[in-house]
Image (cartoon, helix red, strand yellow):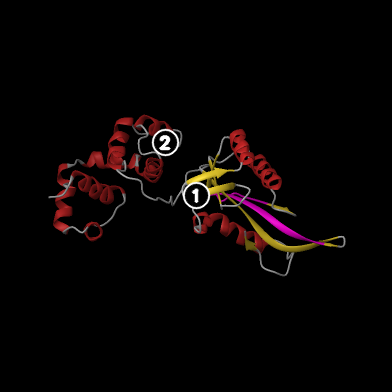
Amino acid sequence: MISNEQIAMIRRLFHAEHWKIGTIASELGLHPDTVRRALGTQRFKRGRAQRMTLVEPYLDFIKQTLDAHPRLRVTRIYEMIRQRGYAGSVVQLRRVVGALRPTHREAFLRLNTFPGEQAQADWAHFGRITIGRARRHLSCFVMTLSFSRALWVEFFLDQTLESLILAHVHAFTDWGGVARTVLYDNMRSVVVDRRGDLIQFHPRLLELCGHYHFAARPCRPRRGNEKGRVERAISYSAIHSLPLAASQPSRT
């Protein structure tokens, strides 16, 4: 006999994530016949399955939101996804949230984003250039929108906090808007101190967040792959930039 939680998980994996019965059985350590009984597809009307498609595009977003805020009310989640284009009812959403609400916190990495949801930013070294008699380090600030891949590239002679803030202002001005979240590496101009999940952001960065109404989010330590979009944007910038230095650009 399996629990109601397992039944809900089986139905979510089958109907929402489109896993095969054999995959579900193998992953959960169950017999395929047990999975088929839990699905009970003959008890559900086809019309209800069709209505579920209204929620499906937002399942990843709902999961991430519940992972970060397990006790968040359904009405608040409804308002959040309605602003992102959801056209279904709160009653339908309530059933989905009840099945997805975690009983404990788990690490979660979002694989896709909505328009304007996330930007990723980072510095890259582009070797040295000669200015007069001096050889100066050349740095490149890169910010890209995760959904549209819109790109902002700006070169500086340093990687100071002032340059970081100025680059943000220029990017937001050029785009005519601001992403809801900006994902960073754990650079010192962003993260002053970090102890596990306890993060102390730089006060000047928080002022910038407060002014432009976006949230700063650093990658987990040694998880640079979490901001793969900006990493690819840096490689793209290196290929399409003039050969400013003989050395290859490297990530900060």
The local crowd at label 2, few if under 14, some if 14 to 19, many if 20 or more residues have their Cα within 10 Å, is some
- Quadrant position of residue 211: top right
Q: Residue at x 46, y 33 (%)?
A: 83
Q: Residue 151's x, y, as percent?
A: 62, 51
Q: Is residue 8 left or right of residue 223?
A: left
Task: Please check the rendered image and state whether residue 61 is part of the magenta-colored stretch, yes or no.
Answer: no
| Mark 2: amino acid | Ile
Residue appearing at x 19%, y 48% in the figure: 39
- Left or right, 156 with reference to 142: right
Amino acid on which disc 1 is placed: Arg
- Indicate the position of residue 142 as horizontal and vertical percent values: 63, 53
Give the percent coordinates (x, y) of residue 138: 73, 59
At horizontal 29% and vertical 43% (from top left) the residue drawn is 103
Q: What residue is disc 1 on?
A: 195
Q: Which residue is mark 2?
A: 81
Query: Disc 2 on helix, strand or loop?
Result: helix
In the displayed structure, would residue 14 be above or below residue 214?
A: below
> Principal SS element in the magenta part?
strand
Q: Residue at x 61, y 62 (%)?
A: 235
